[in-house]
Amino acid sequence: MSTSRSWFCIPRGSHFSLANIPFGVISTATSQTPRVAVAIGDHALDLELFAANNGFAALSTIQPHQAVFSQPSLNAFAALGRPIHSVVRTYIQSVFAEDTPYPDVLKNNSTLQKQALLPLKDVTTHLPMKIGDYTDFFAGMRHAFNAGCLFRGPENALQPNYKHIPVGYHGRASSVVVSGTPIRRPNGQILLDPKAEKNIPTFTACRKLDIELELGAFVCKANKHGEPLPINEAHNSLFGLVLLNDWSARDIQAWEYVPLGPFNAKNFGTTISAWVVLADALEPFKTKGIENDTEILPYLREKEEKNVYDIRLQVDIKTNAGNSSTVAKVNGRHLLWSFPQMMAHHTITGCPLQTGDLLGSGTISGDTSAEFGSFLEQSEGGKTAVKLSGGEERKFLEDGDEITITGVCGGDDSALVGFGECVGRIEPALQL
Amino acid sequence: MSTSRSWFCIPRGSHFSLANIPFGVISTATSQTPRVAVAIGDHALDLELFAANNGFAALSTIQPHQAVFSQPSLNAFAALGRPIHSVVRTYIQSVFAEDTPYPDVLKNNSTLQKQALLPLKDVTTHLPMKIGDYTDFFAGMRHAFNAGCLFRGPENALQPNYKHIPVGYHGRASSVVVSGTPIRRPNGQILLDPKAEKNIPTFTACRKLDIELELGAFVCKANKHGEPLPINEAHNSLFGLVLLNDWSARDIQAWEYVPLGPFNAKNFGTTISAWVVLADALEPFKTKGIENDTEILPYLREKEEKNVYDIRLQVDIKTNAGNSSTVAKVNGRHLLWSFPQMMAHHTITGCPLQTGDLLGSGTISGDTSAEFGSFLEQSEGGKTAVKLSGGEERKFLEDGDEITITGVCGGDDSALVGFGECVGRIEPALQL
């Protein structure tokens, strides 16, 4: 059985090839209750309908659990664990394979095809997981260095702990939104002239609104409170990945973040892509990350040398004037720490990770400015404007700007494993 | 009708007088499904049973909503909003009043009394709310000053933003536990000699385990994403208060917290008291907080001058050797910012607060060392041992130490509004 060719029309270049099978939550105009689906080519397969029509009849493993596909989030499915995700994904691949051993399930069942295979353009995607806690890490070493240079100069750019600890902080779960949700420019306190002697803040709409290009990881298997996840078992808790845009208000951040870290600068919106690409689907694209030249403590040492992913990431901007430009292209491998390392560190104190928790990688930047994953870095802290097409330029985001992040793995156009898009458009600040 | 005297035996000095009526979630050995209750004297009134036996027959407002009392958290009740909380609390007070207008509901109904009034000693209390996000503020100005002195000296102890912003950070919701849950000493990375030239951390059990005496506030009414809570409406989102112990690993914190703030130092456990004292019950104890000598921005200006609470807080320790000592006594008024100010600031960017979110006040310390709400302050950063009874002393916590926080309002022993206890005992670290 070949899983690279399908009886179903999957356009070449689709992010959602047979090699992928990402999971999401959808609704339609005629059926507005959110439920679970997979994306395949230009379509979503409604798994609630598929299950109700005996689509999983041949898969005894999932039979007792089919209610998970009628949920408004992937949490119940995720909680079943990676062995079950693997079985379900492999089965769906085999149902769509040209030489499927289950031709009557869908290939020869045009009624079910019409009911359950929905054009993506007619589908509304929802936040795929009910997020308990959201933690944002700082594993993009080049970004950490770039940001450090702007604040402290190149000699002290990386803090002494940086190569020992997957540095991270607790983020705001309630403001994580799905791709396509508008992002309103936040208001807040800003120190207009940080060099003035009197530190008197001004109340204003954010003037340094930025993006952060990140990968997000969802947790499937929880650990008990008080019991750390051993580093070489942590991959069992990795459900899958999404693209993540950690919108940041740099001027609010500069004034507020001492001594307890970013707060309002980060809690007005975090956008994730709609389809969770399962850890299994990404397995063939594992690669080595940034080499750590520091000896790390045993609880962070992974057996697996290839612990990050070769994902081609791209940031595009479309301005209100209609000009589109590519802002950055960078590979997902530019991380010093892997998600299993982040999870091992996060739980070493006994902190419980729960199904549905979201971990952000931190901004991913490569070595050249065309690979920098934020405007802060691209514009050198607002000093140099970034040139866009149509003669436009940006230091930070303007109202009406639409940012699209994409990410894709694989060289064969008929077997791409991609994330689709992570999109957000800036709305003007509220007048308060 | 007097609400200060009851036909029911409420011991003098009880935190749970008729003036209080705090809400919690309970189960018993014979009925193990968690459900909603109120505490009254030495008893819990099981509101699921009370409702099922027509206890609320006279209260038409709550009739359509009685299912909220069968929930395993207070979230559904909280989401009904403060006007409903007020009606329910006042009704329960009237049911227990000596001259109750509803004598047949409970006073003359010994069957229901036996079923629904459960001795607290036979009851298991659960985490009262399903917590979405937990945010910890830093509004205890004396604590902020004390901690700042230890890190930066008295001249730069308070950061320039401190009196302009209710400084806060996102905490870890999944590790919030109810009073009585043991706290395991965390392991982590510590820099044993911060003055050594090479910054090489050691993996060890935390050696500077500390408490933080705080008040916690639960959110009832959510705000929409993108729409700030106006300062003078924020009180409508205040469900009620609990005691909060923000256990802190000072040595882990010192190494990890630059530049993104506390993370693993705070995510191994946060204990809250089991009974939520409604905002209404605390209304008579409103008082002025610390005067802010800085002009604050309009979005933080409250009409109400009395915006914090006169709560007598106390921290006690019981050691493994059985010696009990009072560590600190401090009043809840020692806050620079009120909970409505924290909520107005938290949402000014549009960040959505949701029903069940928890806000911590930050450590509350008064002016003298006997009023300091952490061992960090009491021991001057570990320099001076705190004397306990039985000749024992502590710089930080030892295994087996049990910390009890209490808090109570009111001068009349028959009308106290108290929080009960917030207890946690330290278990030895895991050997990894």
Image: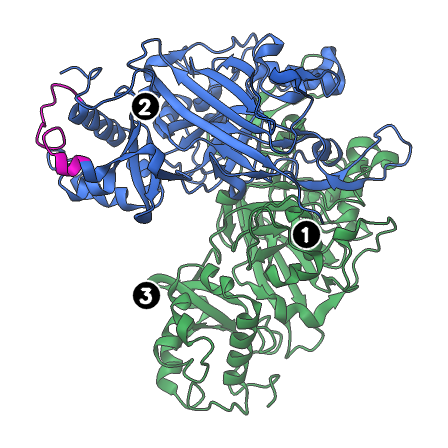
Chain colours: A green, B blue
Query: Would you name the residue on which mark 1 appears?
Result: A344
Q: Quadrant of residue B122?
A: top left
Whole-percent x and y of residue B363? Answer: 56, 22
Report how far apart the C-alphas of labels 2 and 3 lie in the structure. 49 Å
Q: Residue furthest right?
A: B197
Q: Amino acid at mark 1?
A: Ala
Q: Residues within 10 Å of mark 1 (few under 14, many from 20)?
A: many
Q: Label 1 near label 2: C-beta < 8 Å?
A: no
> From what the image shows, is residue A23 above or below residue B224?
below
Magenta span includes A234: no
Q: Secondary structure at mark 1?
A: helix
Q: Quadrant of residue A386?
A: top right
Q: Residue B42: tell me if it is visible.
A: yes
Q: Nearer the viewer, residue B57 or A392?
A: B57
Whole-percent x and y of residue A186? Answer: 53, 35
Disc ID at residue A280 = none
Q: Secondary structure at mark 3?
A: strand
Residue range highlighted in magenta: B97-113
Q: Nearer the viewer, residue B50 or A97?
A: B50
